[in-house]
Image: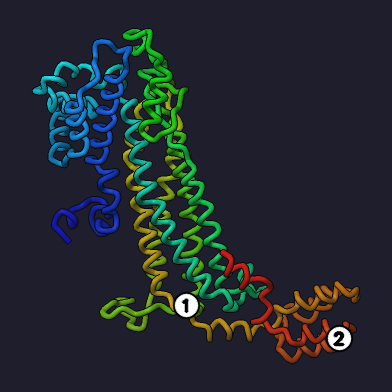
Amino acid sequence: MSEASLLALSPLDGRYASKTDALRPIFSEYGLIKARITVEIEWLLALAAEPGIVELKDFSPAGKARLHKLIAAFSPAQAARVKEIERTTNHDVKAVEYFIKEQLKDDAELGPALEFVHFACTSEDINNLSYGLMLGAARKDVLIPAYTGIAASLRKLAHAQATQPMLSRTHGQTASPTTLGKEIANVVARLERQIAQISAVELTGKINGAVGNYNAHVIAYPDVDWQDFARKFVESLGLVFNPYTTQIEPHDNVAEIGDAARRANTILIDLARDVWGYISLGYFKQRLKEGEVGSSTMPHKVNPIDFENAEGNFGLANALFEHFGAKLPISRWQRDLTDSTVLRALCTAFGHTLIAVDSLAKGLGKLEVNPQRLDADLDAAWEVLAEAVQTVMRRHGLPNPYEQLKALTRGQGITADSMRAFIESLDLPADDKQRLRALTPGSYIGLADKLAQEI
């Protein structure tokens, strides 16, 4: 670990720095500045291509190439220059504008166009589009791949364990059997639904000026169709145009993607807790790693630390996602600045989510199923066949089937022999009686194996 990591205030940049590397180009201060540079340059290019803006001629291929290069080659050293300018301006977006002008002032073609950098824009025009680009990249390149990787691992486990019977525990008590694969398949289905919802969130954007009415745009160029121009520009960035805003785009889309991510994280917390419990029951063993220590005092311990780490980090992420949903859609009158500092914490929520997914994946990779322990629990729970017997009794109209099985099984120690003796006493058709006699807790799984295989 480097000295910088050792001195980092946040574990995202310290202990867990290597696990959050994928987010640095997107959500770091450098990433935000680059996104702003991108929006400012693309806005300038769009203005130059509009015939109605007669004072600004479309740029030559060489001019366009230089502008695009400013985006593509933008470096951390240049971002540091922006921050240096910001020390004077005390305004981060204005510093970006001045940086662009500084970079282009010596260009014979681009220099005369510099006053069209940030033309008719409020800072939020640039910021909302920048965050839209950042969220889009984080969703596509980091968040969705992380979740889909977990879903793929779980699907593989569900298929491999589709037929492995497992005792269910509803309310913590023995219940109708399932299979290990079917329980994992449940998680896959839930997680993939949330992945689809995260993917479906529309990332919206606006570029309509100081209070959302194109005031400055229209006073300068009254004949330009600014609504259509703004729509085309926002869509050219891969975002969805929001025509109705105040000074700020209302961030509903940020809340929506955070809410969907929070639901996905909650599903994975549920999984982490269940696997933790199954490890405690002995249903899973964990592969050992040479040199690892489970406890500082108890040498025998092999703790489920990956699942505990995942649960903790998902919880941290969800606390932030919940705050985003409660805070970001709210702004006093036409604009207040409380959203600015909150938006900067997007990286933290995504970071803890990424750490949690990494830990969960690591933990899943260590699991080994212990079929002997699973089978032993089933063999000690013949009472779970009470549901099967009383349901067949109902089919054939035998009196008080539920009550008879309740008297036989509730709070009683039921064995294979006592259950089969009860079945033998019933006035049932021979085929049904034989099917019940052959039934064991391990074979009473319904369609669980089929459902697991179909996921």
Residue 90 can be seen in this image:
no
Q: Is residue 361 left or right of residue 270?
A: left
What is the quadrant of residue 120 in the picture? top left
Dot 1: element: strand
Q: Residue at the location (44% across, 32% down)?
A: 240
Of residues 99 and 323, the one drawn nearer to the viewer in this rendering: 99
Q: Is residue 141 left or right of residue 399?
A: left
Above or below for 121 versus 201: above
Dot 2: element: helix
Can you identify the residue that label 2 sits on?
430
Q: Residue 132's spot in the image, x, y percent?
A: 37, 36
Q: Residue at the location (24% across, 11% down)?
A: 55
Crowding at dot 2, Cα within 10 Å, few <14 / some 14-19 / many 20+, comes out as few
Above or below for 261 versus 399: above
Of residues 407 and 226, the one drawn nearer to the viewer in this rendering: 226
Q: Residue 320's spot in the image, x, y percent?
A: 40, 46
* Quadrant, the C terminus: bottom right
Q: Is residue 238 left or right of residue 40?
A: right
